[in-house]
Amino acid sequence: NAGVTQTPKFQVLKTGQSMTLQCAQDMNHNSMYWYRQDPGMGLRLIYYSASEGTTDKGEVPNGYNVSRLNKREFSLRLESAAPSQTSVYFCASRDRIYEQYFGPGTRLTVT
Amino acid sequence: QKEVEQNSGPLSVPEGAIASLNCTYSDQGSQSFFWYRQYSGKSPELIMFIYSNGDKEDGRFTAQLNKASQYVSLLIRDSQPSDSATYLCAVSSGGSYIPTFGRGTSLIVHP
């Protein structure tokens, strides 16, 4: 099992550019999450999907959109990137009981 | 706004000592409590979870929960340099499992 995979690992964007971060899990989990992590700020929830076909906003959704493409895949889109979106982005999935499994992260820099 | 507070540290302990990491939370309805370990440049991984008041032990790790004081802690016995990492406390309430993360405590174990 690969667990949770994310692409790309690194990305540099210019202000106003758009991009999609991809996430996939092969553990047959229903719930998936997108977080951002900034220095000294911990993990903040952007969006989550409790099951295929549903998505909900988290703590910091502004400037982002998500798509739960199927049970395996959950993508995060930045329509018009801003320097404030420079961060490390983690995707996670959750098993039936409690544990969240995190992907390796995407380091995004917006100049 | 649900809040989870942790001392950012760094907490420095000598090898072989007990490291004590603390976390307080604001939501009295919180039911599930988690400790994640995050090495520099890596993704978080779950090391302990606790639901009931009291202590829960797993190897060198002990989680302690006091719901009346809204306080959860993690003790690491016989600390090793490989335990040097940031430890994130996460708290969730209800059945939807949307955890709120603290900002993390940096632990340094020196030989």
Image (spheres, rainbow, N blue to C red):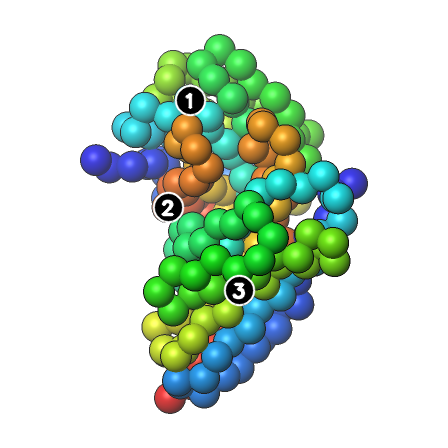
Q: For the N terminus of chain A, which image quadrant?
A: top left
Q: Report the amino acid beneath label 2.
A: Pro
Q: Nearer the viewer, residue A98 or A108?
A: A98
Q: From where the camera sits, is residue A59 visible?
A: yes
Number of the label disc, if any, that sits on residue B74: 3
Q: Is residue B48 above or below residue B91?
A: below
Tag of residue A30: 1
Between B81 and A108, which is closer to the camera in this rendering?
B81
Q: Is disc 2 in the same subunit as disc 1?
A: yes
Q: What residue is shown with label 2?
A: A104
Image coords of residue B10 (percent x, y): 58, 75
Is disc 2 placed on a helix, strand or loop? loop
Left or right side of B43 for A56: right
Residue B74 in picture, x, y percent from top left = 53, 64
Seen at 58% across and 28% down, the residue is B95
Image point (40%, 31%), residue name: A95
